[in-house]
Amino acid sequence: MTWSSCVACSRSCSVVLLARVGSAFVFPMALDGVYYRMDDNDATVYFNNRMQISIAGSTITFQRKQQRPVRLTSRCIDAVTFAVDWFPVNIRWGEGIFRRHEENGVIGLLENGKHFWRYENAVVPESDEQQEARRSRSPRSLVRVRSDHTDMPLLHARRGNIAKVMYINLARRTDRRLLILNELQTLGIPWERIARIEAIDAEHEMESPLECCARSHIAALEQALSEDLEAVLILEDDFQLIHSGRETRERWWRFLETVPHFEIVSWAHNCLHPWGNSGSGDVRVWYLQTASAYVVRRSAMNRLRDIYLQALTERRPFDKVMTRIREDVQWYAMKPALSRQRQCFSDILGKRVDYGC
């Protein structure tokens, strides 16, 4: 941990430290707490739906009255200023810039220079990580984890399991972004474990849409390698679950127990030709098409990226040549599939498409 900045609080003369852990900022403890949105015309009156944000370290959670909390993606600007991506709450809200602020003697946060959020108290609900850690210390929970996979989160800490979900999305396809975030919320993926990969847009490049798609997958793999992730789930933004979130998690954990040595596993597939059964109904891949949803471990990331680069050199569809490395890696496919591509407008084909897989 290195200290990146140090500022003095003008009211209490106490020192506020802003820490950097790896590549992520941790918000100063001075900002921790629960803040309520106040009426724009009267800062002494709560906003009508009692919306609030809770800050605990680098975790920011939004909640309305009688609704479930939503984890928000954030970035630190300085020791008293941070930005929040409102997309999971409302696609039209964009980014909110929050700064520590005092309104008529009341401490709080000012959003975008006009919306006041009053500091209410320092009691912050447990984060997902704290809840999981507390459950993992319980002997009862340990028994349940071994006997019932449905209670285990998809990204539960286990060697070789998915460390992060990356989805590839064009900047102009906000409709798809909202849909895939809803799918990931169904799976119970914490917001801080989701990364959006900006898709390379063929409208601004000299390459075809399919070539740009390949380069977007390469970007996802390179980011996973740079973050030294053990395994990553890479999705295209037309990802759609076939089963419930509960059933998907259960099947994934059964697969991990049965095939712990996998290096790549496809959640969706087309033209699947199996090599052999794994014993769980899932199959070792000889050939398949579709790179819309797959888990890849670090041991196979470089080789998969190289295959995508070869496809670009040969000017061939990357999803039709990716299984060339089948003899070098342990590549499996979930059968039946866990996901499919949503029926919608395809920027690659320029029309509405139902791939059927």
Image (cartoon, rainbow, N blue to C red):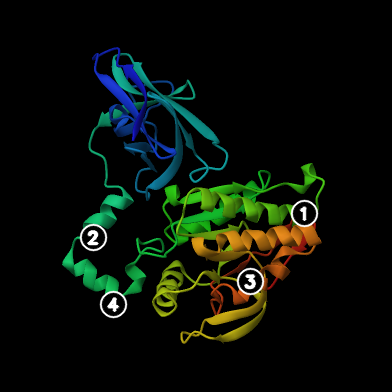
Residue 135: mark: 2
- Indicate which disc, 4 or 1, sits on the residue closer to the N terminus: 4
- Indicate which disc, 2 or 1, sits on the residue closer to the N terminus: 2
Q: Taking 85 as reference, is 107 left or right?
A: left
Neighbor class of circle 4 (other Cα within 10 Å; few <14, some 14-19, many 20+) is: few
Judged from the image, the secondary structure of the residue bearing numbered disc 3 is helix
**Does residue 52 appear in this view?**
yes
Q: Which residue is mark 3?
A: 325
Distance of mark 3 from mark 1, alpha carbons? 24 Å
Residue at (30%, 21%) from the top-left corner? 107
Q: Is residue 3 above or below residue 179?
A: above
Residue at (49%, 73%) from the top-left corner? 262
Locate residue 156, reporting x and y percent: 36, 62
Q: How many marks?
A: 4
Dividing the picture into quadrants, the one containing residue 209 is bottom right
- Indicate which disc, 4 or 3, sits on the residue closer to the N terminus: 4
Locate residue 78, reporting x and y percent: 42, 24
